[in-house]
Every structure is written in structure tokens, then in C-alpha cells.
Image (cartoon, helix red, strand yellow):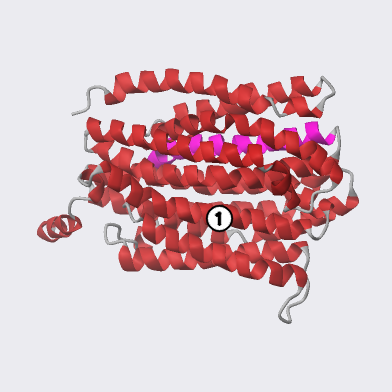
Amino acid sequence: MSDMKEQNNASRGENKMGYMPLGKLLLTMSVPMMISMFVQSLYNIVDSIFVARISENALTAVSLAFPIQNLMFSVSIGTGVGINSLLSRRLGEKNFEEVDKVANNGILLAICGFIIFMIVGVFVPRPFFESQTDNKEIIEYGVTYMRICLIACAGVFGSITFERLLMSTGKTGLSMVSQLTGTAFNLVFDPILIFGLLGFPAMGIAGAAVATVMGQFAAMIVSFILNVKKNKEIHLSFKGLKPEGQIIGKIYAVGIPSIIVMSIGSILVYFLNIILGSFTTTAIAVYGVYFKLQSFVFMPVFGLNNGSVPIVGYNFGAKNKQRVMRTIKLSCLAACSIMLVGVLIFELLPAQLLALFAASDEMLKIGVPALRIIAVHFPIAAFSIILSSVFQALGKGIQSMVISFVRQLIFLLPAAWLLSLTGNIDNIWWSFPIAEFLALVVCCILLKGTYDKEIKNLG
């Protein structure tokens, strides 16, 4: 039996993350993820463009739904980050038995997450929307949309978990296939179900939700098949679907801080919507549009993150300091370059971007200065995003959580509230670059401490 296990482990071999030239490795790991997340951001934009054609209230409802949806994605992605970090480190250590345990416990956690949010979808939507607005039409749009997305969220948890397993072993190209499949379903069925094309009934905002769910289930099915057929470094089994406290604890040592980090966005958006709504509901729509548009820039950077995390984690586990530091530097350079392109787009074409969403004159009046002001912080954010992911790769989830706290709750939200007291809505948008600069200072201090303790003496 031990001979068979040794043979099996030997067949897994040395992973490319340990020997491939880093420039080429980062490209092969990150570009597929960047492409798939770029396409996903395009879907997010197109989805909102279709919803905006229903009415501005429908667009506002989708914007108000973001905090709960983001919380769901935070739990699924944060758990996936924990799986990714632990599994990559165990691969670097050649601990293949624990690699399989991590993968199977990750699937079990995804099932639990789905059950929790299905229950949330039954009870939470109506009181949630009523806490933000008294506009009856917006409430009804929002409740309809959110209930469908939450009750049928199995595809979210399944697809993200199986995609993270592919990423953890360096198979980001296969993960891209899964994500593009889901996005394609969304793009095709969004207009069909919203407007009733090709003989389908016109479902309005419910159609947008159903199309989203269909895409998530398609991605889950494809990513599961790819893991079973192509991911030979991981062995999935029904027998392995039993909780192991030690493994789950290690997953959530990184996963819980990551969940908190991403959930902070829900708190931020919820209270920012209230601050902006005190001026006009159009400002909420503008912020919702900004959030969709900024994903066009940020999603490729997050794709770069997804490619770099397993590389850093693997080489940290293998005690290869040079490859760890080189990966961090290359990632920062690439992220900053992407963000600079985003700044140019937002500064030069704000009116054209807003026009995609059938922007009214009032929406243009608020939105044009908003996009130009907020875009100032993009290059600064590039460094914070990459360095935050480095902490995740090293299993230092607390530091990653601290960065997000200071960016959004400690600095941004109080700054937005204080600037709103001036009575000029344009001033609120300056809270983004102010908070990002202060957060970068904190991030660099934390990274210096982590470098001295964890990286400096590697190998």
C-alpha cells in the first residue's frame, strides 16, 4: 500500500510553479484568468445596460442588491482563497495526502455555504430593501431579483470552489474555460429572458436573475468535469466529503479574513448608498454604474492576483525566496500598468461610458465628475490589491483583512460622510483617492514586517 502511495505521489511530479521562468509562468497563469475576468466584467456591464433599458429604478434596484450579493460571493470566494492558499502550499511541500483532504473539505464547505444563503434568500430581501428606500417600485424590483439569485445560488458556490481547485494546481487555462462558459450563458440569455426574444416570455428583471443563475450552473458543471478529467494532482471522492476540523481550520485561517475583507465592501456600499440617497436616488444609480465600470479595470487585476497567489504560495512552501520576491515585483508592475489604462479611459470618456446606461441629464451631471475623481485612485489601488494577495498566499489572512478594513471602513466611509456634510455631492468622490493613499502606507508597513519575519530568511 505504501509503495502504491509513493508511486502515485511521484506521478504527480514537480509542478511548473517551481521551475518555469517567472515571466512566462506569470503570463501563463494570469492571462487566462485576466481574460476570463475581463469578459466577466464585460458581462456585468452588459447586464446593467440591459437592466437600465427597463428603467432607472430597475438599475437602482440592482445597485441596492449589491451588498447581499457581494456577501454571498465573499463567502464563496473567501473560502476558495483559503483552499487555494493551503492547497498550493501543500503542493510545494509535496504533501499530496493533505492536498486531497483540502480539496474534498473545500467541496463540503461549498455545500454548507449554498444552504445558508438559500435560507437568506427566503427571509432577507424585503426587509433589506425597505431599510434603504421607500420607493415601492425599486423595492419590488429588488426583491424579485435578489430572491432568485440567492435561492438558486448552488452554482455560485460550486463553480467558484471547482475553479479554485484548478487554479491551485496551476491550471488557470482550464479555469478560464469554465468561467467563459458561464459568462457566455449569461450574455446569450440576458436579453432573451429580459425582453422575451425567440419565443421566450418577457420576464423583465426576473429574466436578468434567471440568466445569471443559468450561467453559474453552467460554469459549475464544466469546472467539475474539468477537475475530474484533467486535474490529476487532486483526487476527489465522495468518501472524502467528511469534515476534518484541522483542515477546515487551516482553510479558514486564511478564508475567514478573506471573507471579512470582501464583506467589508457590502458594508461600504450599503452605507454609501444611504449617504448618496440623501442627495438623490440618481446618485445611487451613478455609484452602481461606477461599480460595474470599474470592474472593467479591476477584474483583470484580480485575475492577475488569482494567477500570482498559487505561485507565491507554492514557492513559499518550497522555501524559494527569489521566486517569491520576483513574482511580487512582476505582479505589481503589471497591475499598475493595467490601472493606468483605466485612468485614461475614465478621464477621457466619462460621458460616453455613462451613455451606455441610458443616462439622464441628471445622471450625467453627477456621473461625469464622479468617474473622473474616483479614477485618480486606480494606480494606488493596484499596489494594495497585489500586496494584499501576497498576505493571503503566505497564509497571513489577518494582514490582508487589516488592509481592507483601513481602506474601506477606517478611511473611506468616514471620509465620505464628512465630505457629504459640505452639501456638495462631488466632494464625496474624493474619499476614494484619500482612503487609498492612506491604506497603501499601512500596507507597506505590514509588508515590511512580514518580509522580515517570513521571507527574508527563506531557504
Most distant residue in the bottom direction: 199
Residue 427, above or below 122: above
Q: Which residue type carries mark 1?
A: Gln
Q: Is residue 71 left or right of residue 85?
A: right
Residue drawn at point x = 43 percent, y = 59 percent = 176
Relative depth, front residue between 171 and 266 = 171
Residue 200, above or below 100: below
Secondary structure character of the magenta stretch overall: helix
Is residue 232 in sight in this rendering? yes
Q: Residues within 10 Å of mark 1 (few under 14, many from 20)?
A: many
Relative depth, front residue between 22 and 353 = 353
The count of marks equals 1
Is residue 394 in sight in this rendering? no
Q: Which residues are magenta?
A: 248-277
Q: Is residue 360 left or right of residue 323?
A: right
Residue drawn at point x = 54 percent, y = 42 percent = 298
**Res 250 quadrant in image:** top left
Q: Quadrant of the N terminus?
A: bottom left
Give the percent coordinates (x, y) of residue 412: 65, 25
Q: Quadrant of the C terminus?
A: top left
Give the percent coordinates (x, y) of residue 403: 51, 26
Where disc 1 sits, the SS reads helix
Read off the residue under disc 1: 40
Give the percent coordinates (x, y) of residue 234: 30, 57
Most distant residue in the front direction: 348
